[in-house]
Image (spheres, rainbow, N blue to C red):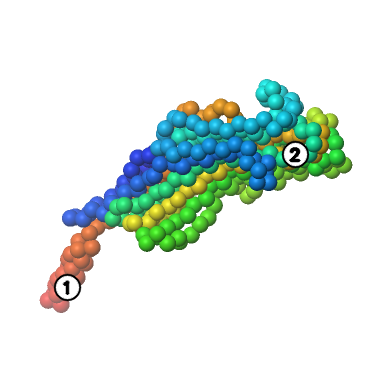
Amino acid sequence: MQAAARIICFAAITMAFTATGVKATAIIESSDREYLVFLDNAAGTRYATDQIVLPPGDGRRIQTYYQPGWAPFRMDRSNTHPTGFLSAMASGRGELEVGVSGLVGAAANGAAVAQFKQSFINSGTSAGELSIFYTIPSIELWVTIFGEGPQEAYADATMSATHYLADASELATWNVFQYRSILTSQRGAFPGLFQSADLARYNANWASDGITYDSAIFPIISETRPLAILAPGEALELTYTLLVVLSSGAEQGGQAMIGDPFEISSENGLPFEVLLASPTDVPEPASNGLILAGLLLLSVGHTRQRRSS
């Protein structure tokens, strides 16, 4: 097997099986990406939304922003925004960034979502094996530890995949990855940190002043995961979603962020690239037959020589 070849998503991806008189090729064609960003109260009330369809690599961006009337969350000293906020951003390069932050008066919830969808189809004459290289921005969770609580900061970065057969029927749907974490606090109880199986392989950087806040910050994650083997005519749809939610009791607050919800941080390299495995050259079936026939003739000749001797 030759080394895998990395091909950027917006280009057609090809691989070929070569042999005497035969060439079978996998051609993976990708669609434009459908982007969606929105903000709500985590209970169905939508504050702001935007959507756009862009070719991969297009630098245009969309953003939603909402001020819910919360005070700024100053426990995070890097947060200089003058008010509490809900924000979500996306760019045609594949970057998604979301955040919810603030100190509330009355108990309140807020959520920010950014998502893109993209489809791939094998228009060639041979099967193609796909995988994906991806980068997830840093996940940051903060909660206050004063007041009655409970407080909860929630973050989730998930990519799902759906495999369609050539007749457009659905073969399977699964999560390619899911990086999910929940930080909770309540008076009289130790802070709780949940990590999904994917995220449990990474250590959080804990910080606390012991009086006002607890925080857990995860590193930027870059990995490669298998996707599917697409036979000719089959398709794969990918959906990548970032979701953050802050649930706060009265006179408390917190922050949940994936990346920087006000500035796209990844300017060098694309955060998502499809990989197509290069095939091993295989002989034409007819050539196999000729080779076997030749071996048989050699065997017969050798037998006759032994008998004549």
Judged from the image, the secondary structure of the residue bearing numbered disc 1 is helix
In contact (CB < 8 Å): disc 1 and disc 2? no
| Label 1, label 2: how far apart the Cα atoms are | 87 Å
- Packing grade of label 2 (10 A; few <14, some 14-19, many >=20) is some
Q: Is residue 287 left or right of residue 149?
A: left
Percent of width and height locating residue 196: 64, 48
**Where is mark 1, residue-wise?**
300
Q: In this view, does 122 lie to the left or right of 110?
A: left
Residue type pointed to by label 2: Ala
Percent of width and height locating residue 208: 77, 31
Q: Determine the residue positioned at 87% across, 42% down.
A: 188
Q: Residue furthest right?
A: 188
Q: Determine the residue positioned at 53% across, 47% down.
A: 159
First reached walking from the N terminus: tag 1 or tag 2? 2
Answer yes or no: is residue 37 visible.
Answer: yes
Q: Which residue lies furthest to the bottom in this view?
A: 307
Q: Determine the residue positioned at 56% across, 27% down.
A: 263
Residue type pointed to by label 1: Val
Judged from the image, the secondary structure of the residue bearing numbered disc 2 is strand
Looking at the image, residue 116 lies above or below residue 296: above
Percent of width and height locating residue 166: 36, 60
Q: Which mark is drawn over residue 108?
A: 2
Percent of width and height locating residue 18: 24, 52
Give whichever of 38, 145 is nearer the camera.
38
Answer yes or no: is residue 73 visible.
Answer: no
- Image mark count: 2
Give whichever of 277, 296 is nearer the camera.
277
Looking at the image, residue 184 lies above or below residue 227: above
Q: Residue furthest left?
A: 308
Closer to the eye: label 1 or 2: 2
